Amino acid sequence: MKKGSKGLIFIVDISGFTKFVSRTANEDGNWIIRQLFNSIINANELSFQISEIEGDAILFYQFGKPLSVTKILTQFKKMLHSFHAQIKKLKGIYPIVKI
């Protein structure tokens, strides 16, 4: 990318993550968190790139023509819906899931 290029940073953060991790067995908690992150990543219809996944957040980015606020909000809603659908599914397997 050329210097001065436009871009977008989009950070998705899981609310309640610290409390969940402190109450959950390490192996189960890691698997559950991976499932939740995957639900967000798989809902990424705007082809954001992933810079990093750290703790309870995914840092997405995209260079190029700026996206409309409507497209960004629609993307966020799709990720949120996918995340909540995954929580609902996981609650059937792990009653401890309370994020």
Image (cartoon, rainbow, N blue to C red):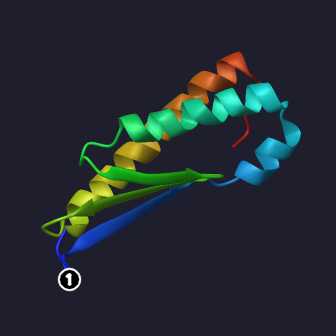
Q: Residue at position x 46%, y 34% from top?
A: 39
**Seen in the image, is 19 located left or right of residue 57?**
right
Question: x%, y% of residue 8?
Answer: 30, 68
Q: Which image quadrant is residue 29 in? A: top right
**Residue 43 placement, left or right of 18:** left
Name the outermost residue toward the top.
Answer: 93
The residue that appears at 69% across and 43% down in the rendered structure is 99
Nearest the camera: 31 or 73?
31
Q: Quadrant of residue 89?
A: top right
Mark 1 highlights which residue? 4
Residue 60 x, y percent position in the rendering: 39, 56
Q: How many marks?
A: 1
Query: In which quadrant of the rendered view does residue 26 lie?
Result: top right
Residue at position x 33%, y 51% in the image: 49
SS of the residue under disc 1:
loop
Classify 44 as above or below 5. above
- Position of the N terminus, as image quadrant, is bottom left
Under mark 1, the amino acid is Gly
Q: Tell me residue 74's x, y (percent).
A: 28, 53
**Image check: 68 left or right of 50?**
left
Q: Residue furthest front?
A: 2
